[in-house]
């Protein structure tokens, strides 16, 4: 760990002193890339601090920020808040007004910053029910609440001496941020993380990845309010990487081709979509080209690391890389060295296929409460095991409780839950974070996640069902976009399925057939049943999916089916499709 970095804002000053960048942050404006240098970043962060001090913000005051897209001003605000001893409280842009009212009140937020007018109006509509003194925009507007107007507030006095004094008083154990969980179940909890928690994770991750500093481009597109992306942002500052902000997740493919990144942080759903697009293109080939594509894909699905396969296999793989997989690499910019996956279980098949194609995937494990350090795969020293989430990062202890729950100990473990000592005491016992995940650790120290403790359920016959394992297996079918396994207290496990509408339309066209209603089309239902029958073979009879229903709409973040990191909101989905549930169990 660097002796000069012990607080989060130190990362920015470290870059200024050791590897100042002309293109520290890069964003699209009118179809062209604009850049902000490290020097400009620090200068504007000090303006933020000055304006906040002029507004009367004191150490330990809470500043909320809500952004629909990642942008430089979020990071400028973050450093400006942290270096005067206040705390940043990031919120998801997809929340409802009532959720904003709850979190802003619960966190005692004094000011709130938003990225656009829609969010400004949402927060303004509930501001009278909170302690907010004002709302500002992260955008340059002519209005008095615009970003430039806010930065000018601090020009009335010279605050730099006071800023430096406040910085010196901030300790590494001090609270840095409160992150409210996205709430797949229940009321959001405010996770308190110290400067030390996140700094520790950054350095231990940096040691595991072992990348060289500088001359690397990365793309920022996952929600910055999520701890995974936010910790990555401090890591990028430390390493002196150039950060490019994607305009939206829908345009991520265009951004990848434009920026040509050297590594990507991904969530499983995005990787599944990338893979589906690649396979769709392969399906549209003809003749020998199509045969070669699926030969290479079949070969990649059998991949094992560390030359465990025969010399003949690796000779074939070399040919496949030259003929087929080089095109995959070009489609992903041509520079991509690896991808890090977190947030949810990743299909083993995807790890094999992409790694065989020369694009390494390192699956890791962590949570908001662990800042989000935990474990991570890497290729060095036999540190990759497909199907696992790797070995623990240095100075993090993992162990399995008697009931199978994963327990974690280290400087990455949160301070606790804000204003909820009872829940804190239930979650952190004898220094160990009780993660709520079920797992196993093998003789070599690799951790495998088997399910979420809260998501496992019993059928009426008393058999335990681990839905995540079933869902991950069944999502390998190109017919299935999303699937949620149900059956708690029922006689059998079943599933609610959102089909891959794009694929089933193309499938129907190939068979000169038109699907009018996917939920009741017999031919489609029979075809999906074949997929389920095939994948069911990997599970015990009591676990196998016996019935399913198809939804007519696409599951999305906007409609509330998914969290901003694309995890299913199980309670919401079950409620939305109550009739389908009843069709399964009451018919």
Image (spheres, rainbow, N blue to C red):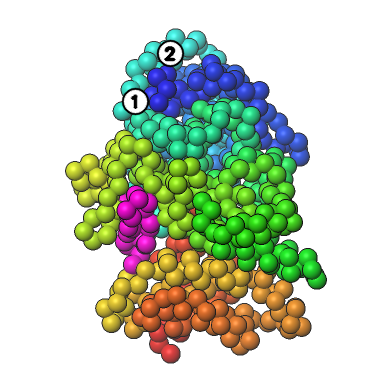
Q: What residue sits 75% from the left and 78% below the top?
A: 509
Q: Position of residue 107 (x, y in %)?
A: 36, 40
Range shown magenta: 435-456
Dot 1, how many residues are within 10 Å of its Cα: few (below 14), some (14-19), or many (20+)? some
Along the horizontal axis of the image, is 584 left or right of 29?
Answer: left
- The disc placed on residue 172 is 1
* Lower sequence index among marks 2 and 1: 2
Q: CA distance from mark 2 to mark 1?
A: 16 Å
User: Which quadrant: the C terminus?
Assistant: bottom left
Relative to 487, say whether 297 is above or below: above
- The disc placed on residue 164 is 2
Q: Nearer the viewer, residue 530 or 297?
A: 297
- The disc placed on residue 211 is none
Return the residue found at the far left.
430
Specify the quadrant of the image occupied by residue 356: bottom right
Q: Nearer the viewer, residue 7 or 419?
A: 7
Along the horizontal axis of the image, is 122 left or right of 442?
Answer: right
* Magenta stretch: includes residue 445: yes
Dot 2, how many residues are within 10 Å of its Cα: few (below 14), some (14-19), or many (20+)? few
């Amino acid at each position: 760990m660097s002796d000069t970095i012990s607080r989060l804002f130190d990362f920015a000053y470290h870059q200024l002193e050791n590897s100042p960048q002309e293109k520290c942050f890069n964003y699209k404006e009118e179809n062209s890339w604009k850049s902000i240098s490290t020097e400009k970043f620090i200068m504007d962060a000090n303006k933020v601090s000055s304006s906040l001090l002029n507004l009367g913000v004191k150490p330990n005051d809470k500043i909320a920020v809500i952004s629909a897209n990642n942008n430089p001003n979020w990071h400028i605000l973050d450093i400006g808040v942290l270096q005067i001893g206040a705390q940043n409280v990031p919120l998801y842009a997809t929340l409802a007004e009532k959720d904003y009212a709850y979190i802003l009140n619960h966190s005692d937020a004094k000011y709130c910053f938003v990225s656009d007018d829609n969010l400004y109006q949402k927060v303004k509509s509930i501001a009278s029910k909170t302690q907010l003194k004002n709302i500002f925009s992260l955008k340059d507007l002519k209005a008095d609440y615009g970003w430039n107007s806010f930065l000018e507030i601090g020009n009335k006095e010279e605050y730099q001496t006071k800023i430096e004094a406040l910085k010196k008083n901030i300790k590494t154990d001090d609270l840095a941020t409160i992150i409210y969980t996205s709430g797949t179940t229940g009321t959001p909890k405010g996770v308190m993380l110290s400067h030390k928690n996140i700094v520790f994770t950054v350095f231990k991750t940096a040691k595991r990845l072992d990348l060289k500093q500088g001359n690397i481009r990365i793309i920022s597109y996952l929600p910055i309010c999520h701890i995974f992306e936010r910790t990555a942002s401090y890591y990028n500052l430390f390493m002196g990487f150039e950060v490019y902000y994607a305009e939206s997740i829908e345009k991520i493919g265009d951004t990848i081709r434009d920026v040509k990144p050297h590594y990507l942080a991904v969530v499983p759903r995005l990787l599944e979509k990338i893979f589906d697009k690649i396979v769709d293109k392969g399906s549209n080939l003809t003749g020998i080209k199509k045969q070669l594509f699926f030969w290479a894909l079949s070969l990649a699905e059998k991949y094992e690391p560390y030359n465990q396969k025969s010399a003949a296999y690796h000779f074939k793989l070399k040919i496949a890389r030259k003929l087929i997989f080089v095109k995959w690499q070009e489609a992903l910019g041509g520079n991509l060295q690896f991808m890090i996956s977190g947030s949810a279980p990743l299909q083993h098949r995807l790890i094999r296929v992409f790694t065989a194609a020369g694009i390494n995937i390192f699956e890791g494990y962590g949570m908001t409460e662990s800042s989000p350090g935990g474990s991570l795969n890497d290729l060095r020293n036999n540190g990759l095991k497909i199907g696992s989430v790797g070995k623990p990062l240095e100075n993090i202890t993992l162990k399995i409780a008697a009931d199978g729950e994963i327990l974690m100990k280290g400087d990455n473990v949160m301070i606790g839950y804000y204003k909820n000592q009872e829940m804190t005491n239930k979650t952190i016992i004898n220094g160990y974070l009780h993660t709520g995940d079920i797992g196993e650790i093998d003789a070599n120290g690799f951790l495998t996640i088997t399910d979420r403790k809260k998501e496992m359920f019993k059928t009426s016959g008393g058999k335990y069902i681990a839905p995540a394992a079933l869902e991950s297996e069944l999502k390998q079918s190109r017919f299935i976009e999303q699937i949620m396994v149900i059956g708690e207290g029922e006689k059998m496990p079943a599933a609610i399925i959102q089909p891959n509408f794009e694929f089933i339309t193309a499938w129907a066209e190939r068979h000169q057939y038109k699907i009018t209603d996917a939920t009741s089309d017999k031919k489609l239902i029979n075809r999906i049943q074949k997929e389920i029958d095939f994948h069911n073979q990997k599970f015990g009879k009591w676990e196998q999916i016996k019935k399913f229903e198809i939804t007519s709409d696409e599951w999305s973040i906007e409609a509330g089916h998914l969290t901003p990191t694309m995890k299913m909101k199980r309670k919401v989905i079950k409620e939305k499709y109550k009739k389908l549930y009843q069709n399964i169990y009451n018919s």
